[in-house]
Image: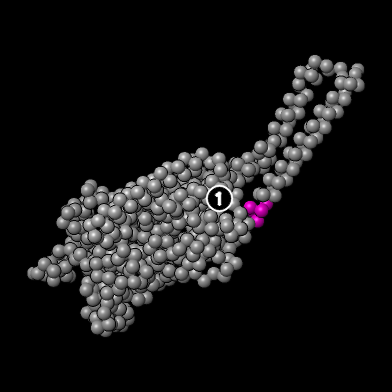
Amino acid sequence: MRPSIVGWWALIHCVLCSPLLSAHSDFFTSIGHMTDLLFTEKDLVISLKDYIRAEENKLEQVKKWADKLDVLTASATQDPEGFLGHPVNAFKLMKRLNTEWGELESLVLTDVSDGFISNLTIQRQYFPNDDDQIGAGKALMRLQDTYKLDTNTISTGELPGTSLAVSSRSTLTVDDCYDLGKIAYSEADYYHTELWMGQAIKQLAQGEESTTVDTVTILDYLSYSVYQQGELERALEYTKRLLKLDPAHQRANGNLKYFEYQLGKQKKAEEKEKEKEKKEGAERDKRELKTETSKGRPADYLPERKKYEQLCRGEGLKMTPRRQSRLFCRYYDNSRHPMYVIGPVKEEDEWDRPRIVRYHNIVSEKEMEKVKELAKPRLRRATVHDPQTGKLTTANYRVSKSAWLAAYEHPVVDKINQRIQDITGLDVTTAEELQVANYGVGGQYEPHFDFGRKDEPDAFKELGTGNRIATWLLYMSDVASGGATVFTDVGAAVVPKKGTAVFWYNLYPSGEGDYRTRHAACPVLVGNKWVSNKWIHERGQEFRRRCGLEETA
């Protein structure tokens, strides 16, 4: 450990007040004793030079860090939303502020620049915490799965939708990959642990240096993660590689014996099974080793995960050419509404069953910026209705922040509400306030219904305005890659387009829920997604959308 300036003066004080010097204060009377002081002074000079070198090294490290961050922040602040739209940038920002700035604080803690330390200490209370860093890491893995990206694609920053030059591309270091592997490991997600520890060891083998982790540590994680996925032979292979580098590794030596024992049992069981089947004259099927978990992604709570992710990637769309030929674009005046007779809006059919339409150029750039400006100070983690309690709560499957804007707060909000009413023909006085949402790194909202189902009759009871009859979704930004709105039941996908709005009915005219409207917001791969929702309720629509006599008509 480097001696600080305080520590160095303490050393001087310790030497000068040692028993030798205090017992013989009249050194000038003895050359022999004075020679001792010379050696003491020499030791102090050596210690002082060590301190100076340590401080110079420290300042050099701080200077390199400052220069690197100066270039990065100068580039990033020119287009903050574009910069943070790249998920690797967002993850590294979380990691930098949560971990690396703390390490820098420790490095300069004994510096004479108390002002900087005080400022950093004060500011750190507003920095991301461990939960933020873990959340950003899990978001990268979510993007990896949804868009079928390999770890090398993410690590090198070559994401779909990016057009950055190689020199300015965001990349992950060995340490970053290792940290992602540890995040997965802490969640008992051994599938992603293996992927990211494997990427870390690959980059080490390519000559990249690490300041925090070595090959032995990574191999330790790899052997255990593949074992947990039922691959004994590979676990044994990684363990042997580890022991070649560190023969005295206690845990690896124990694991080696255990893996060999388990592998022996497995082979004996296979041989017995083979003999049994041979006697019975049956062909032996390949048997998978039975362990607590199986190879691949962890078990999922969402039964339609595969379909959802396919639609997010632009796969699995169910619109036939014949059906597509019946979709049109038109100028729409809502049955000659006075506002739109002279200036009708552009309406485009996105889907036929259920009918989903898109309105183009529905809000201006100035209006969208004002809505964002009003919402930003109020953005909080988005909530969902708990079907058990009927109350609002946060959920891991909805990753965004939202704010609610009332019509009286600004003329722009009132104008947008009036525009929604004029175009849809529905009464918005009983609708919910305008909800503005901004999706973060890997931001998503997994498949859900906007309306309250029969198993949750009290979902909107407190509002007293009935169920959500329709949804108006306004896109306030373009998204470079990902972020589509997909309808998993019918196989539809709607791509965000800035300044456009999509509209659909959640309920049939009979008041029954249309289960075809189950939809999701796909994870944002690259870019920044701003949307605003208007959920229109049943009350007030009695003479605007008359009740049908058939359940699904």
Apparent side of residue 175 relative to residue 344 in the rendered image (left or right): right
Apparent side of residue 85 relative to residue 469 in the rendered image (left or right): right
Instruction: Say whether residue 316 is visible.
Output: yes
Magenta stretch: includes residue 64? yes
The mark tally for this picture is 1
Return the residue nearer the eye: 226 or 326. 226
Q: Main secondary structure of the magenta part?
A: helix
Q: Which residue is mark 1?
A: 215
Q: Residues within 10 Å of mark 1 (few under 14, many from 20)?
A: some
Rendering coords of residue 370 (x, y %): 42, 64
Rendering coords of residue 418 (x, y %): 29, 68
Magenta stretch: includes residue 375? no
Apparent side of residue 334 relative to residue 441 in the rendered image (left or right): left
Amino acid at circle 1: Thr
> What residue is drawn where x is 35% and y is 49%?
268
Rendering coords of residue 16 (x, y %): 78, 24
* Label 1 secondary element: helix
Magenta stretch in the rendered image: 63-67
Instruction: Say whether residue 340 is visible.
Output: no
Return the residue nearer the eye: 16 or 113. 16
> What residue is drawn where x is 51% and y is 61%?
155
Rendering coords of residue 279 (x, y %): 25, 56
